[in-house]
Amino acid sequence: METASLSGLARLISNRCPPPSSENARDFSKKMVSKTEEEQVNRLEIQVENGGGGAWEYLCLVRKLKLRRSDRVLKFGLSILNDPKKRSNLGPEEWTLYEEVAVAAMDCQCLDVAKDCTKILQNKFPGSNRVGRLEAMLLEAKGSWEEAEKAYLSLLEENPLDQVIHKRKTAMAKAQGNIPQAVECLNKYLEIFMADHDAWRELAEIYMSLQMYKQAAFCYEELILAQPTVPLYHLAYADVLYTLGGLENLQIAKKYYSSAVELTGGKNTRALFGICLCSFAIGQLTKGRNKEDKENSELQSLSALALEKEYKQRNPSKNALLTATLKSLKLSS
Amino acid sequence: MAEDLVLDTAIRDWVLIPLSVVMVLIGVLRYFVSKLMRSSSVPDPKIVKEGQVIIRARNLRAAANFIPAKSFRSRKAYYSNEENGLLHVPKGQAQNAQAQMFSDPNMAMDMMKKNLSMIIPQTLTFAWVNFFFSGFVAAKIPFPLTQRFRSMLQNGIDLSTVDVSYVSSRSWYFLNLFGLRGLFSLILGEENATDDTQRMMQMSGFGFDPSKSLGAEKDGLDIVQHEWALPKFEQRAEAVLRKLVS
């Protein structure tokens, strides 16, 4: 029963509004960049695209916000690097740009460009840890895992507390499809750097993919502790608890869905559906003995109403689907 | 009478300007020497971990009400149980930390290097100024000052009748010593190593004892009362939705 309604839910949500440009939408939702910053980046991007200048500002902003827009970074970065006058205007920032472009090139599989950038940096800073890291990443991008692993290990020997290298090792294990090793790597990393919430988030997502929901729940608790006002974590935690099932978990899940609703001002469709589904599941489990149902049913019907209103406003064509779903949850009015 | 006092231009050429130039050059030199001597210290994993534990425990304390009671209790036990909790510091070890810090030769060496690069040039330049330029009136500032400034501006001249706006050479040295920071940050970049006050702060923070803050964090965690905030959120969500729907 649960799986059926869940997949219906997934279809509903994914059909509702096609994401404007899936890649951008993803990197914003993942990195949590504020709305104004997002607008600024997009404006700059269009400006540079149309030859309005400001490429360097755009690159700085992308680096600052840690966005992943490798194709454009590569394009704009190269346009600066290939112009000797523009390049010399940067002064010492030139080397930072080389690094940024090298990483972007690896991401785009332009290995020649990445190789050239790394070589230039290697000549400028021989024996540098940071360039060594770049070289290892280049090996990684080529797919020669063993050599990359060796390079990372030798870098770690010099500086055993290099966070980036630990993270790279995890990413490498994940890229090879060796998920258990990635988990092990991340756990080892988190043993020391236990306040790094990005790592906790990654671990939570890996556990989710492995269907180890209890472990994932722990990670999401850790994330909620680190940033209690981010609704995404409340939502994800509720999802995990709902998936785990059981009366107690469902009740807790419902509470976290409501907190997500409260934190987003009722704008989060998934949280609204979550409340409906939780209430329904709780109702199923406590069928014979409904004592406390009365007070909770209000929240449930309210969220159903909110959903109906939102669908009517934003996507009337899917209204029938919603009504059917709500009817199956015995919520339709 | 003060107006009568005329400073020889030779004083300007042979005292004021050389003194300033020498101070700047010494500052730059010191920057490069300390850059050479700076050893890239590898941080101790244990200390890094302790710092991270403290951050995590602080998060737990601040946001305890956002996780279910069961999760909070298990975390609390994990941090502060008496056997192997993360925040628990064994009795004997706490005393040792300080002694251990001083017995570590690397750390003592580091401190000495820092001290040497700061104290030696200062002593030398002070001796040099004292020897060659003692008792000079090196400059005159263009505005009058009250008597209180006499000890600051006329160090080394024991005449109470000289107008306070005249600056003695030794005072000029001190003014340069403390006043050139802005210039250095222009020449050497923002994070130059000649910032004396910052270094003083580092020195005082040197005796920082991580085990003490671990203990403090443990005490803080022990008195946290867990009161789950989420049940309230159901009502609040209801209110939000009611406003939205209506």
Image (spheres, coloured by chain):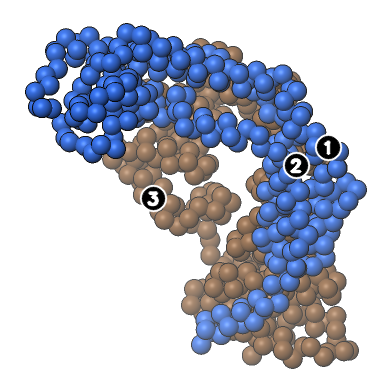
Q: Horizontal placement of A104 versus A161: left or right? A: left
The amino acid type, in three-letter code, at marker 3 is Gln
State the quadrant of the N terminus of chain A.
Answer: bottom right
**SS class, disc 3:** helix
Residue A130 location (% of width, % of height): 58, 24
The amino acid type, in three-letter code, at marker 2 is Ser
Residue at figure coordinates x 56%, y 32% from the top left: B202
Residue B215 location (% of width, % of height): 76, 48
Residue at figure coordinates x 28%, y 16% from the top left: B135
Q: Are marks 1 and 3 on the same chain?
A: no
**SS class, disc 1:** helix
Instruction: Tell me how far mark 1 sits from mark 3, CA to CA.
Output: 53 Å
Instruction: Tell me how far mark 3 sits from mark 2, CA to CA.
Output: 45 Å
Foreground: A287 or A237? A237
The amino acid type, in three-letter code, at marker 1 is Gln
The residue marked by circle 3 belongs to what chain?
A
